[in-house]
Amino acid sequence: MQRRINIWSSIDWLTVTIYLVLVFLGWINIYAAVYNEDHQSILDFSQRYGKQLIWISAALVIAFIVFVIDINFYSYFAYIFYGILIVVLIGVLIFGKEIHGARSWYELGNIRIQPAEFAKIATALALARYLTSYNLQINTVKSYVRIAAIILIPSVLILMQNDTGSALVYFAFIFVLYREGISESIILLGLFVIILFILALVIDTLIIILLSIGVVFIIFWFLNRKIKHTGIAFIVLLFASSAIYGLNEVLNAGLSYYYILLISLGISGLVYIILAISYKIKNVALLLIFLIGSIAFTYSVDYVFNNFLEQHQQKRINVVLGLESDPYGVEYNVNQSKIAIGSGGLTGKGFLRGTQTKFDFVPEQSTDFIFCTIGEEWGFLGTLFVVLLFIFFLYRLIGLAERQRSSFSRIYGYGVVSVFLFHIVINIGMTIGLVPVIGIPLPFFSYGGSSLWAFTILLFIFLRLDASRLELLQ
């Protein structure tokens, strides 16, 4: 049952105000980043800051249109939006324009549209629609497969466009799933895979296998809570390892420690499965599968790293992990960005007075590296203000999501938070060298019509849903 309310009086004007402040700050920082004394007017439409003003004006019109549409439109047509964007993403692989090595853009005259930005909105809507399906059980294999398909299909298509940064954004939806009650073991498994991938690049494979065995023993004890069962498993493995090592020495077979350990795991695993069946010990087979998968994944990391990632992506990861140094190559952007931010000191050099900015030391300073302009001209206090403003923005969105009466609105709200959180953390992190450079915009700050429009639509659909929350009678 519903009642009609005045949506304009119910809109969260505080969030709208934060949005307008962020957009304004982004605009003046784009002006500072590409300032040219020959084009001093901030209304010069031949320059990026002039063009950005056009995108901003269009974004405000789009926000108004999004807000006046009935809320049921977004849930009813969620799957249709998603399907259309999937077709558009496929189309860009064929008809798209390649820029900086990524075929991610449609070019319509002087306007370029990046569909990957809008696909995030469609994915958030489709995920919210599916998770509110009648009688849905989220922690089932069937649900896991469908959820994975909703998230991974656009991500893979974008990855095929050679736009790794935008593809990774879709994994932020894991926060939505966690809020909606997905098993914590799935979250922990994902974190374990990420950690295992990083460790496989940094340390020896044998050590990783030993660590994986240790993790399995800890999980085994945690699940069964019987030190006796865990102790027997350890003794079986120790005995098998000692026996294989001894035979290797006696027979002078020349097996490396890798093969000795792998053979020992295979033998001890079979022995312990027999014991587990006899004494009805739980979770043994599942943990053995987990261990085998971990070892196989560890050995596959090098192949994936060397064959699926571009050379510049490999270097960026190696630089962040401290495995490689390339100060005049892939490190150049980040080094110049850190110099710019550090040179700002406490209060900054002042508006339009950034020397790193003026002499174009930092490439892509009006787009992916816009944050270093804030650091150089506004200093630590300016960057702190922007970061705190973003934090408050996210905190406000979480509050709005939690007060929703509709499950669809709540889930979509957390989708909005997830996308913004990923963009903010990764963009700022890459400008200060904490994460590899993957090329994603800082919301409302980076130059570009596609990202600004997409972020605006993403946000204002949620504000529209929130404004109508009181229409639902309890």
Image (tube, helix red, strand yellow):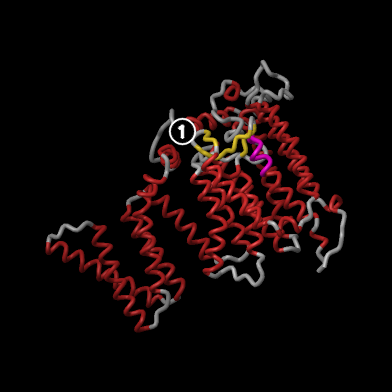
- Residue 284, given in percent of the width and then of the height, sits at 39, 74
Looking at the image, residue 117 lies above or below residue 174:
above
Report the residue at 65% width, 41% height from top. Answer: 443
Q: Quadrant of the C terminus?
A: bottom right
Label 1: which residue? 331
Q: Is residue 329 left or right of residue 416?
A: left
Towards the viewer: 469 or 426: 469
Span of residues in magenta: 446-454
- Residue 274, given in percent of the width and then of the height, sits at 32, 79
Residue 427 in magenta stretch: no
Q: Is residue 55 left or right of residue 244?
A: right
Report the residue at 54% width, 47% height from top. Answer: 90
Residue 158 seen anywhere in this rendered image of the structure: yes
Indicate the quadrant where residue 323 lies.
top left
Towards the viewer: 126 or 283: 126
Question: Regarding mark 1 in the picture, which secondary structure is present there?
Answer: helix
Mark 1 Cα-neighbour bin, 10 Å: few <14, some 14–19, many ≥20: many
Report the residue at 87% width, 60% height from top. Answer: 4
Indicate the quadrant where residue 470 lies.
bottom right
Dominant secondary structure (helix, strand or loop) of the stretch shown in magenta: helix
- Residue 223, given in percent of the width and then of the height, sits at 46, 73
Report the residue at 38% width, 73% height from top. Answer: 285
Q: Amino acid at mark 1?
A: Glu
